[in-house]
Amino acid sequence: MKYKIALTLLVVIAVIHISAKDITGYVRDAKSNEPVPFTNVIIKGTTKGRMADVNGHFSITVNENDTLFFSSVGYYSKEILVSRITEDPLIVELSEKIQLVGEVIVKPQIPRATQLLNLIQEHKKENHRKIQQVSDFKTYTNTTAYLAIDTASLIGGVFKDADQTTFPTDDDNFRFSPVYLEEEAAEYSLEKDTTLFSKEEGIFPNLNKAIKSLILINMEVDLDFYRDQVYILERGFISPISDNARSYYHIYLNDSMMVDGNKYFRFSFVPKNKYNPLFSGHFVVEDSTFALTRINTYIAQEANYNFVNGFESNISYTKHADGKWFYEEQRIKLNLSLILNKDSTNRYSSQRVNNIKGGNWLITKSITYSTSSRLDQVAPNIWGRQPEFVHHSIDDDVYEMVYRLKEQNMIKAFDAAGGAALTSFFNFGLLDLGPIFDIYYTNLIEGNRFSLPLRTSEKLSQRFSVGGYLGYGTKNKDFKYGYNFAVQPFERDVLLLRFNYYNDYILITQDKFLRYVKKNPNNRGNGNFVAIFTSRERNPYLKEEELYEAKLEYNTPGEMHFEFVPYYLRNKSTPNVQFIRDGVNYPKYSNYGLFLHMKYGFGQHYDKFFFDRVYYMTPTPVVNLSWDLGKVSLPGNSSFNPGYYSHIHGSIQGRQNLGLIFMDYMVNAGYLFGDAPYDLLDQPVGSMSLGYAAYRFNLLHHASFAHNLYSNVHVYFNGGGIFLNKVPGVKKLKLREILSFKMHVGTLTEAYNGVFDLPGYYSNVSEFPYAEIGIGVTNIFKVGRVEYVHLLGNKYKNSGFTDVHGIRIKGEFSF
């Protein structure tokens, strides 16, 4: 059992052969005893190796019969048999190579380095094309997340039966606990890509999707350095062989080597500006094709990457019989923590990844490639044990640890709390409580509104759910209620059937299209607890609404979502929301119609939480298109018989990576025409509180504009520390600059025929755009954001329905 645990730890964490071992050491000048930076440390007879960091420190995995070859420009090379190494750490001394030609000169081959780099860039497109031409291949992917447990700390006491649920380490004070495990076997061809085997387990069932989507998906394993940028954890990194690489990196030609009659060149690179999110590391290219054969990268500590204590990637290529290079293996290792590990490890060293402290997450993700036809005869679930994939499978004992941990009460409690933050539902066995923002909120009619929203959970049925809520207002003493059910007839969510009914008070300034943009199912408020408790004025603009709607949803395998929604509404007036036409006050009216919606995700990754698909903000945009066609019916013997109304609405949201900076955006526009009530007009939602709202206008009051032709723009820039990282002392806080811009443009055209008179609290006298700009900082204590928001221009400065400026607060998680 102990042998299996030790073996599994080596396989999962280090991904090496059984006979391998780690050698660490330092390379020094034999005469001065100073470090020899960027020394090549290579396994003789191969192109596999490492580059020592700026302090001469190195770490490499070798076999007992290997020979280590050390070389650096200006020094004589040196060979050491692994079997004779007894020192730990190993101290390697290199003698300086001096040529006496009148005077001592040590000069690297700068012209030759420039010439070779130009040749690499010239052949880059051709080599990239050849890799992409390999269409028939198989992959085996292995992803693991381990939590370092300090056995003397509080968190160490959470994990019961530590001997059976954690791995021992060399340090008796620390153990590793498996948190997330995933294996996948896939086959790729010109016709299609097929996942043949997939296995996923984690100790936090409610958080597995978040761990995968927010971290693991962004650990891009397809590290294509032939592209100009590589994206990892929401950031774009300039490739060291990109066309403009020399603007960002110092690139050095270290030396050349002969392996099996072929010549290879070894380069190293470091950022010119150590505070920029760039790689350091080394790469090897073949002389004849100038193709990459291996590239190793690290991220500097000074890059100030949030939550990241260490990062390392290793990509190796193999040459096929036809002379084309293709991927052999890609591997990423990531050390994550809420706090920065205090250590003396140099910023360029891969050792920062392995510098583990209590509470650190050690995450590895590897993908191994093979074009072997032999695998066609092997079951995909055991591909990880085949020689083509270098024994990458996860041992059954590790899965057993996960099963044991999932049953522990403290783990279940933590998972429930985390799941509620992510999905907005608390699970209590067969029932879910939520959405959580619907439990309490305030308005002028009800005062403090308390609700008990419940639904049956996935534990009762994964294809059927019944839910509802009961609400009570402390001011008007009214009970309000609603119920719903959802059915998924088939195993996959290709088709969904829902029915929803409620009788409740509804804000007329709610954006009915916003539910397709938000990432949670909260129906009320702005999704910010700060807003709930800091509101300066309770919203008075509510109507009493009774809704009946049926919903038919159709989902394609990964890109498109369709909704077909017939509905019927009864609307009742309240003291601040009156339905008046030509002096006649209608206490109620009804409208019915058909609502159609389409979402297109361009193949973007999404998570399915029970019956809902959640798309995250990524460089891939998400497009929403909606069409509402309906008719109003007035009570009594009204002389006015309204015709039909039509409302077309579209939005696009996504993220644009701009190197160090990234920009999130959401733009929507719409057009309402025909005989429609004013509560269907676009009304930019305001928020009179300290809470920052992502898709609301933070200075507007509760009711301001009402337009039938409109557009709204929400843009948010995260500076990634481009300025704050350069401020002494401040850079340790890892703060990020924030710049936001929000604008509403709209008008009332003659195509809109109001069924009721527009209330006087709306200001539509000007078609001048309304805009706010904000500046602030985020990543405060890792999760906080504070922004100063200011009204742009003087047009609405004295309008009475908007603040001129203010401080807004929000919680957010970002790398």
Image: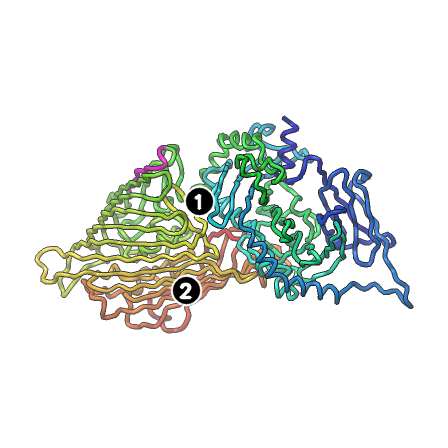
In this view, which residue lies farthest toward the top? Answer: 1
User: Is residue 517 in view from this perspective?
Assistant: yes
Which element type, helix, strand or loop, lies under badge 1?
Answer: helix
Q: Name the magenta segment's main secondary structure.
A: strand
In this view, which residue lies farthest toward the front? Answer: 322
Magenta-span inclusion, residue 462: yes
Residue type, label 1: Ala
User: Is residue 154 in view from this perspective?
Assistant: no
Q: Residue drawn at (59%, 56%), measured in percent from left and top?
A: 130
Residue 412: where, in percent of width, then height? 47, 34
**The label number, if any, that marks residue 742 in the structure image:** 2
Quadrant of the rendered structure where residue 696 is?
A: bottom left
Q: In the rendered image, which residue does mark 1 sit on? A: 421
- Considering only vertical position in the picture, is 185 above or below 667? above
CA–CA distance between discs 1 and 2? 26 Å
Direction from residue 562 to residue 607 in the image, left or right = right
Residue 555: where, in percent of width, then height? 36, 47
- For the residue pair 568 and 524, the one nearer the viewer reads as 568
Residue 209: where, in percent of width, then height? 47, 43
Image quadrant occupied by the N terminus:
top right
Residue 327: where, in percent of width, then height? 61, 49
Q: Residue drawn at (35%, 55%), measured in percent from left and top?
A: 514
- Considering only vertical position in the picture, is 566 above or below 17? below
- Considering only vertical position in the picture, is 36 above or below 155? below
- Highlighted magenta segment, given as a residue range: 460-470
- For the residue pair 164 and 125, the one nearer the viewer reads as 125
Residue type, label 2: Lys
- For the residue pair 576 and 113, the one nearer the viewer reads as 113
**The label number, if any, that marks residue 575 in the structure image:** none
Which element type, helix, strand or loop, lies under badge 2?
Answer: strand
